């Protein structure tokens, strides 16, 4: 299985900050990587797929980059509704796998 | 817009079978891959497997011997069956749709619609 390691696991930031979350894959996944946002008691919400393509309706302050084994999710100008847990997912090889999650908290 | 809703028992006894239903509304179950994902308390997400609308399946090897996913296109539903459950199977179970987008380099895949999830506790 392809292992995905996210860093950091916890992140404390303020409204308006720019933050970056990294996802490293144990082997190359090309651009077959997605990012999800999850709030307590809610289902995951797709933010980005294909490493860098923004899902319809997702604010442009979210962006993704990377290819192969190293990826990042950047939020430029944090809003109150952005404080949540973020997870990456590889869809290159079965079984699909997810990162362990990064919890973004308000400082 | 498309909606998915999980349903089934919230409590299952050890060694018994977990059975869940995902009902798809405001859209057809035809086409697409329909998946199950779970999240154990305090842990990350785990892909369980998918069923294509035609009936073909693919399962996570870690669960393959115990999992069956099936579909009823006439009812716009698909199902999860997990046998011989233990406490380690306690989790929130989500159903989701896997879609794809074709670009020049080939298709890109993603899970675009999810149910709200249902908590299943394995306990005697």
Image (cartoon, coloured by chain):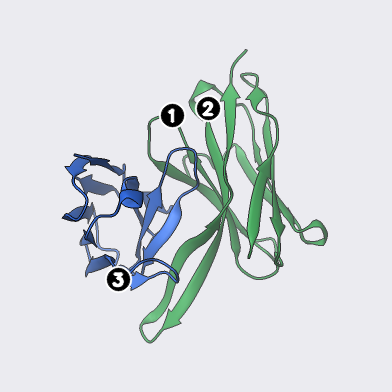
Chain colours: A blue, B green
Residue holding disc 3: A52
Where is residue B44? Give x, y as percent.
Answer: 38, 40
Q: Position of residue B73 (x, y in %)?
A: 77, 61
- Same-chain status of marks 1 and 2: yes
Q: CA distance from mark 3 to mark 2?
A: 34 Å
Q: Label 1: which residue?
A: B41
Q: Residue at x 68, y 40 (%)?
A: B20
Residue density around tag 2, few if under 14, some if 14–19, many if 20 or more, within 10 Å: many
Residue A71 as seen in the image, left or right of residue A41: left
The 10 Å Cα crowd at callout 3, few under 14, some 14 to 19, many 20 or more, is many
Viewer-nearest of labels 3 and 2? Answer: 3
Which image quadrant for residue B113?
A: bottom right
Whether residue A92 appears in this view of the structure is no
Name the residue at 62% across, 26% down. Answer: B84
Both labels 3 and 2 in a single chain? no
- Answer above or below: position of A34 versus B82: below
Q: CA distance from mark 1 to mark 2?
A: 8 Å
Q: Secondary structure at mark 3?
A: loop
Spatial separation of the CA atoms under disc 3 and disc 1 = 30 Å
Can you see residue A54? yes
Residue visible at 42% across and 44% down in the picture: A39
Q: Position of residue A96 (x, y in %)?
A: 42, 54
Local SS, label 1: loop
Q: Chain of mark 1?
A: B
List the single residue furthest toward the top. Answer: B124
Q: Which numbered disc covers residue B57? A: none
User: Pointer 2 indicates a residue of which chain?
Assistant: B
Q: Nearer the viewer, residue B3 or B14?
A: B3
Q: Secondary structure at mark 2?
A: loop
Q: Is residue A85 left or right of residue B121?
A: left
What residue would you read off at disc 2?
A: B90
């Amino acid at each position: 299985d392809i292992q995905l390691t996210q860093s950091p696991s916890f992140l404390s930031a303020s409204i308006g900050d720019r933050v970056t979350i990294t996802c490293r894959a144990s082997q190359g996944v090309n651009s077959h990587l997605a990012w999800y946002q999850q709030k307590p008691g809610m289902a995951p919400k797709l933010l980005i797929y294909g490493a860098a393509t923004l899902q319809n309706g997702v604010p442009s302050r979210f962006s993704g980059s990377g290819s192969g084994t190293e990826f990042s999710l950047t939020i430029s100008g944090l809003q109150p509704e952005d404080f949540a847990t973020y997870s990456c997912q590889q869809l290159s090889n079965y079984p699909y796998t997810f990162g362990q999650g990064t919890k973004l908290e308000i400082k | 817009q498309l909606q998915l809703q999980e349903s089934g028992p919230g409590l299952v006894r050890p060694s018994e079978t977990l059975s869940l239903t995902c009902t798809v509304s405001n859209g057809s179950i035809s086409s697409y891959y329909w998946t199950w994902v779970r999240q154990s308390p305090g842990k990350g997400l785990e892909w369980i497997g998918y069923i294509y609308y035609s009936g073909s399946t693919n399962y996570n090897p870690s669960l393959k011997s115990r999992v069956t996913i099936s579909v009823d296109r006439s009812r716009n539903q698909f199902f999860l069956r997990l046998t011989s459950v233990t406490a380690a199977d306690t989790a929130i179970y989500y159903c989701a749709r896997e879609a794809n987008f074709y670009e020049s380099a080939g298709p890109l895949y993603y899970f675009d619609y999810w149910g709200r999830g249902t908590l299943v506790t394995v306990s005697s």
